[in-house]
Amino acid sequence: MDRPKTFQKESITVEFMVRQLRETVGVSVVPVNDGVGASDREVTESNLHRPGLALAGYVDLFTHQRVQILGNTETQYLHDLGDPDRREAFEHLVQFPVPCVIITADNDLAPPLVDRATEAGIPVYRTPLPTVQFTSSLRSFLTDQFAPQRAVHGSLVDVYGIGLLLLGKPGIGKSEVALDLVERGHRLVADDVVIATQQGDDILMGAGTDLVQHFMEVRGLGLVDIRSMFGIRAIRFQKRIEIVVHMELWDSDEEYTRINMVEDTHDILGVDLPMVRVPITPGKNITVICEVIAMNYLLRHYGHDPAEVFTERLRKRIQQEGPPAPRRSIEYFEQDYE
């Protein structure tokens, strides 16, 4: 069996970055010099740089390969210089093949400096957002772009706010279970191919592909458009993957979890996700089991573990002195006929 392939972008063009900032992130970025060279310049990492020291003349450790941000401090420094000094300071920056320069907080750059950047083929942009807010949005976008990704064959559904990744052999019924969950009011994220993206050390975000989106293939039925059939409330474009439900045919020789806590894990991109193995037998309602898995995960997240509660109750009963009670230790309601 082939190991799932991990892929990761090595670079994106400045033109793509600016377009996505406008269309998907909703950040206004306006080209100052018509975005000259934006289709040729490439961004290769998610880190950003504010070139204060470079403008002052110290370029020994200048990380020119990063997107350069000019905030209030840098633009005010340039404005306070005389024309010759201003040109010299800016030359320290444009002598390197920087991807682009972005001016924040609606600051501006002197026209001669813009012309010099144009000569060097460096696109210059301006945004009205404050530096902190803009850099946070841009860094989040670039982190997502350069994050490790893996295509996983399965279905991802948001069940009670918990991202359930349904895995199993082809034809075992993952799409049918996902469809049943959607019909019961839960939300489909992706079917058949789930793109898992690593965000941080232990966070995996799941999404569908641009081509498939929220279409679902059900064997014997064909393609189903979930968004058109069930409405916008039945879908999500991405969701954190929190627990794996592995569907497998019943095997009498296997030992399945019954009372103790779930300890199985499933590795995706180095992140160990808790995994529940659900054996498939005729008549078993897998949809309800998935709902219970999600609710049980919520209970454990908020500090209530049914297995630990039952174990503690059993321990106390064993430690009790004397014979066991002759009947159940519940209150007796006289003439309760209901």
Image (cartoon, rainbow, N blue to C red):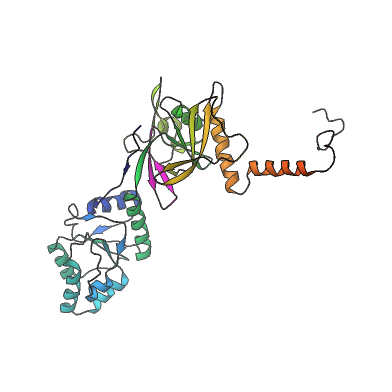
12 and 186: which is toward the camera: 12
Q: Where is residue 15 in the image (x, y as percent from the top left)?
A: 23, 52
Is 150 left or right of 87, judged from the image as shown?
Answer: right
Q: Which residue is drawn at 56% across and 42% down?
A: 297
Q: What stretch is highlighted in magenta?
A: 192-207
Is 3 left or right of 16, judged from the image as shown?
Answer: right
Vertical arrangement, residue 65 with respect to residue 314, above or below: below
Looking at the rendered image, the quarter that the C terminus falls into is top right
Looking at the rendered image, the quarter that the N terminus falls into is top left
Q: Which residue is drawn at 84% across and 37% down?
A: 323
Is residue 26 visible in the rendered image? The answer is no
Label the magenta part by its dominant secondary structure: strand
Vertical arrangement, residue 153 with respect to residue 131, above or below: above
Q: Does the magenta stretch include residue 336?
A: no
58 and 320: which is toward the camera: 320
Is 114 left or right of 215, judged from the image as shown?
Answer: left
Vertical arrangement, residue 295 with respect to residue 16, above or below: above
Q: Please tell me in which quadrant of the rendered image residue 317 appears.
A: top right
31 and 135: which is toward the camera: 135
Q: Position of residue 262 (x, y in %)?
A: 56, 40
User: For the view shown, which residue lies furthest in the left direction?
Assistant: 119
Q: Residue at x 61, y 34 (%)?
A: 258
User: For the view shown, which residue lies furthest in the right direction?
Assistant: 334
How many labels, in total?
A: 0
Q: Which residue is drawn at 34% across and 53% down?
A: 143
Is residue 319 visible in the rendered image? The answer is yes
Q: Where is residue 92 in the image (x, y as percent from the top left)?
A: 19, 71
Q: Where is residue 123 in the image (x, y as percent from the top left)?
A: 20, 59
